[in-house]
Image (cartoon, rainbow, N blue to C red):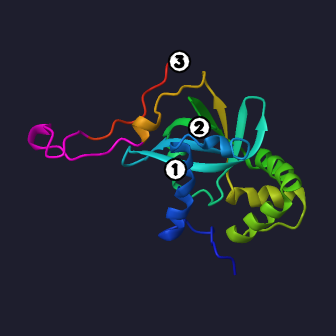
Amino acid sequence: MPVFDLSHRPRGWQKQLFKLPTHFYRLRLGFLFARRFLMIEHLGRRSHKLHRTVVEIAGHRGNEWICASGTGPAADWYRNLCAGGLEAIWLGRKRYRATVRFLEATESSDFMAAYEQAHPKTAKKLFEIMDVSYDGTDKDRVQMMAKIPMVAFTIDGTASQKGGPNVLFARRRRLGPRGRRGPGGGGPAPGPRAMRS
């Protein structure tokens, strides 16, 4: 039985573990993952709060970066994107405005076939912890991809250093009555600044 069971959304310590890579991006160390991972900034579909999630890059085609939801269609970041909550993506140290499209199962299957060829051990482990499998045929792989949705990010505009460490690490402090600064000072941390188009 695998240590991680991604057939259900991670909770508790597993959820916290998956959040650890975001701290590398906050420290401007995202270049360590530049070729294999990217970070998504997305707004909660109910809370509208900013969230950050690091996902693996499953493929790259032109100006598109293809990523899969390793925890399936129930993943919060995927559901937030479905609700139109994409804010930006981080590639290495740089933050980009981007658009997203949702791949059909047939196109996802083609990318997964290429991913399996490039990373056979990782793909095998992904299938194991997601509790999915297919019989090796293209038709069955297409059916399997309904459980592993993929998205394509297209960079829209140039990189920006806005939303850097001073923003990402800004402390959230309590406000006093009527929004005045209470003891210890400071208002809530500002979110990442909007980038120029």
Type of amino acid at the residue the image marks with label 2: Trp
N-term mark: 2 or 1: 1
Q: Main secondary structure of the magenta part?
A: loop
Label 1 sits on residue: 23
Q: Residues within 10 Å of mark 1 (few under 14, many from 20)?
A: some
Q: Nearer the viewer, mark 2 or mark 1?
A: 1
Residue 61's quadrant in the figure? top right
Between the residue at mark 3 and the residue at mark 2, the CA separation in whole angstroms equals 16 Å
User: Residue visible at 79% across and 44% down?
Assistant: 107
Q: Where does residue 105 sit, x and y in percent of width and height?
A: 75, 50
| Residue carrying label 3 | 197
Work out which residue is located at the far left of the displayed protein and give it: 177
Residues packed near mark 2 inside 10 Å, few (<14), some (14 to 19) or many (20 plus): many
Whole-number angstrom distance, CA of label 1 to CA of label 3: 27 Å
Q: Can residue 58 be found in the magenta stretch? A: no
Q: What kind of element bears circle 2?
A: strand
> In the rendered structure, does residue 170 fall within the stretch colored magenta?
yes
Q: Residue at x 58, y 37 (%)?
A: 89
Q: Quadrant of residue 117?
A: bottom right
Q: Is 18 drawn above or below residue 93 in the view shown?
A: below
Q: Which residue is mark 2?
A: 90
Amino acid at pointer 1: His
- Which portion, as a residue range, is magenta? 169-187
Q: Give the amino acid at mark 3.
A: Ser
